[in-house]
Amino acid sequence: MPVPQAIRAGISEEEWQVRCELAALYRLVAHFRMTDLIYTHISARVPGPEHHFLINRYGVLFHEMRASDLVKIDLDGNVVEEAHSSKRVNAAGFTIHSAIHMAREDAMVVVHTHTAAGIAVSAQRQGLLPISQHALKFYGHLAYHDYEGIALDLDERDRLVRDLGTHNAMILRNHGLLVCGASPAQAFDQIYYLERACQAQIAAQSGGAELVLPPESVRVHTAAQFNRPKANPGYNLAWEASLRLIENDKPDYRS
């Protein structure tokens, strides 16, 4: 979509495309009820040689996010675009995101959520149990990071990166969920299914019956099926289909 003339200065067509996709991802996270008012974040790397990123303007709810609401910042959370210098961002909220973006060139998008199911599973010693097909998507591909308090200490970034390793999904103990992806579509796929796996676990546990766990061989086989290389991953189709859910929202996320 062409860049609106009012905000065209300083924004390339490539960056505007990322802005539109990131705004759409915010709205889809809201659509599937994975928000926590204004207190979680989704960030995206800005194309180009600079280490610049897009993040939500502090105070904008996810369901109303627009491409023009996103603010360009550096690795320290400082606003780097003059036109938006008065826009407030939650720099402390970028601590977790900056750690992943700095360490993982493949992490174009980072999503962090505080959902009831995600927090509940994060507080369980065994973490995500291999009791559903959704959970098996992450079997052997899920990291954990112990809670250290509100993420204000920049020293924690090294430990976040160490714990995430090469995985694209992580449970932050006593805190919530974190995923990353090489595209908004991949990041959406990761957070959607990790959240659904957590919801299924809490629902299954609430029934009080003994849980059935597939044998180890089936767990490994299923995880390999989910994570095998694909020329055209299904999550791209799911992303395109999901965009229709927010196509008629007002104001348009692409504005």
Image (spheres, grey):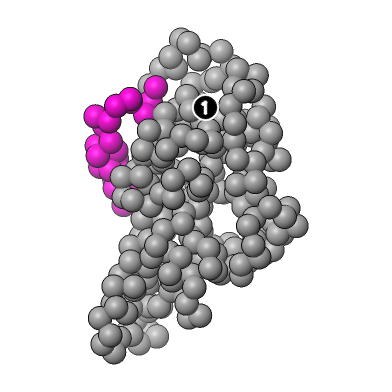
The magenta segment = 234-255
User: Residue at position x 51%, y 57% from top?
Assistant: 178
Q: Is residue 17 left or right of residue 48?
A: left
Residue 246 at x, y percent in the picture: 28, 36
Residue 82 in the image: x percent, y percent? 65, 19
Can residue 6 be found in the magenta stretch? no
Q: Is residue 127 above or below residue 182?
A: below
Q: Is residue 252 within the magenta segment? A: yes
Tell me the quarter of the image containing the N terminus: top left
SS assignment at label 1: helix
**Residue at the far right in the pictured view:** 155
Tell whether 199 sits left or right of 7. left
| Residue 114: image location, x then y, percent | 46, 57
Which quadrant is home to the C terminus? top left
- Read off the residue under disc 1: 15
Specify whether 57 is left or right of 73.
Answer: left
- Give the residue at x 65% y 29%: 79
Q: Quadrant of residue 204?
A: bottom left
Instruction: Pinpoint residue 173: horizontal percent, then vertical percent.
Output: 55, 69
